[in-house]
Amino acid sequence: MPLAIFDLDETLLCGDTASLFCRRLVKLGLATPDFLAEEARLMEAYATRTLDMADYVRFLMRPLSQLSTAQVAALLPAFIAEDIAPRIYPQAHQLLHTLAEQNTRILIISATPTFLVRAVAEHLGVADVLAIDLTVTDNHYNGEIEGIASYQAGKITRLEAWLRDHPFPRADMTFYSDSPNDLPLLEYVPHPVATNPSPVLEAIAHENQWDILHWQAPSACLATQP
């Protein structure tokens, strides 16, 4: 059985799940508008591959510190329906459906907290998820990462740990991603696919003769563009 591995943000959906969740927190009054300016600054560091993921996770989870994990989970259905579902690339739905029909195992591996990624994956009908696990104290997220973050080379570490329980021949692995942060894993698999790639990744993909996919942006994404 082949294994198809997908990054999530800007790959399967037009946008970044954590950034969209930050907007939701401001909309709900759980964070102030200046929270978005700081988040944008941190995402600039992500784009240049210099982001300290532990710092970002602490920042992201700060407005949720007074909410229990159950209260956080209660925020997700509306978030997925209103902010995420309209941004899923139609071609992503089509590809996931085709792969499932071909008996391909599908795994989403993301540098976004697990509680968000799993909610999106459930919407997409994907059962297998590797994302940034968070530690919990007294039924509250404490803002710290548990174990290895699935970020940059950490995606390989997390994947190899997963493969010990779910063995797949490396020759049968394909990885779809938009981001140069995922270069370690793109270079690790035999079938890298630059999917809606950033300009940096697209140049690298052309240089290495990798497959490249450009998908049509959903209308919800086009409506937010200047």
Image (cartoon, rainbow, N blue to C red):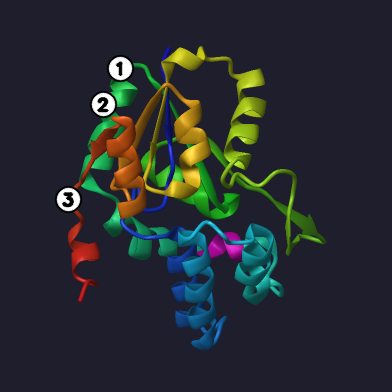
Q: Looking at the figure, which quarter contains the N terminus?
A: top left
**Tags 1 and 3 touching, CB below 8 Å:** no
Residue bearing the label numbered 1: 102
Name which residue lies at 64% across and 63% down.
Answer: 57
- Residue 124 is situated, as x and y percent measured from the top left of the image, at 37, 42
- Residue 220 is situated, as x and y percent measured from the top left of the image, at 23, 64
Q: CA distance from mark 1 to mark 2?
A: 6 Å
Identity, as a three-letter code, of the amino acid under mark 2: Thr
Identity, as a three-letter code, of the amino acid under mark 1: Gln
Q: Nearer the viewer, mark 3 or mark 2?
A: 3
**Tags 1 and 2 touching, CB below 8 Å:** yes
Q: Which of the 4 image quarters holds residue 210?
A: top left
| Relative to 115, residue 129 above or below | above
Name which residue lies at 24% across and 72% down.
Answer: 224
Do we see residue 127 in this rendering?
no
Q: CA distance from mark 1 to mark 3?
A: 24 Å
Say whether residue 127 is left or right of residue 166.
left
Q: Tell me, for residue 98, which label it has, or none.
A: 2
The residues colored magenta run 71-75
Mark 1: give few (<14), some (14-19) or many (20+) Cα within 10 Å. Answer: few
**Nearest to the observer: residue 80 or residue 8:** 8
Residue bearing the label numbered 3: 216
Name which residue lies at 59% across and 33% down.
Answer: 156
| Relative to 29, residue 99 above or below | above
First-in-chain label (1 vs 3): 1
